[in-house]
Image: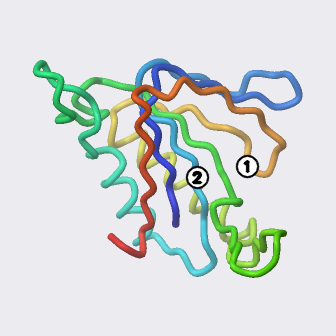
Amino acid sequence: MIALIQRASRAEVRSDGRLLGSISAGLMILLGVIEGDTMQDVNKLVKKCSMMRIFADDNGVMNRSVIDIGGQVMVVSQFTLAADIRKGNRPSYIKAARPEQAIPLYETFCRLMSEAIGHPVATGEFGADMQVELINDGPVTIIADSRGL
């Protein structure tokens, strides 16, 4: 499971012109479920994302988590994080989990993240064509792969 974690001043996601979710200060997480991912991968990434200290403390040092600042979280499914670009110029997405595996893991990640931060997370719509608007604060962008945690 791969998460692209971005510290956001604000973010929103739309599909077909309708607003699916929005957040103010917090984390925008693009989540890619990889073939073979399990609940262990979900648990590792929820813990890492919710506790990652990438928000400034009173001294301007990145020493606070999204929980510490009472921040919000948005999670958007992103199968293209599974792209294999080693051969040719057209990415292969064969490593991305099929929807029957990916949807339950994505939904569980969102539920557990909500429990970790103490309030609901904003989400996109799995499999939809979405437009994401983000003000990346910093910018701070971190890639986390559950296989390396």
Q: CA distance from mark 1 to mark 2?
A: 9 Å
Q: Is residue 75 above or below residue 38?
A: above
As drawn, the label of residue 107 is: 2
Which residue is rendered at x = 78% and y = 37% of the image?
130
Q: Is residue 59 above or below residue 80?
A: above
Q: Is residue 67 left or right of residue 122?
A: left
Viewer-nearest residue: 87 or 119: 87
Viewer-nearest residue: 69 or 148: 148
Which residue is rendered at x = 84% and y = 69% of the image?
90
> What percent of the width, then of the height, locates residue 107?
58, 52
Q: Residue furthest right?
A: 16
**Image quadrant of residue 32?**
bottom right
Which residue is rendered at x = 47% and y = 31% of the image?
120
Q: Is residue 132 above or below residue 103?
A: above
Amino acid at circle 1: Phe
Quick one: label 2, few (<14), some, or many (20+) residues within 10 Å? some
As drawn, the label of residue 126 is: 1
Of labels 1 and 2, the one closer to you: 1
Q: Is residue 39 above or below residue 108?
A: below
Q: Is residue 4 left or right of residue 26?
A: right
Which residue is rendered at x = 54% and y = 23% of the image?
135
Q: Residue furthest left?
A: 59
Determine whether label 1 and label 2 are within 8 Å by CB.
Answer: yes
> What percent of the width, then of the height, locates residue 146?
42, 68
Amino acid at circle 2: Glu
As drawn, the label of residue 61 is: none
Quick one: label 1, few (<14), some, or many (20+) residues within 10 Å? some
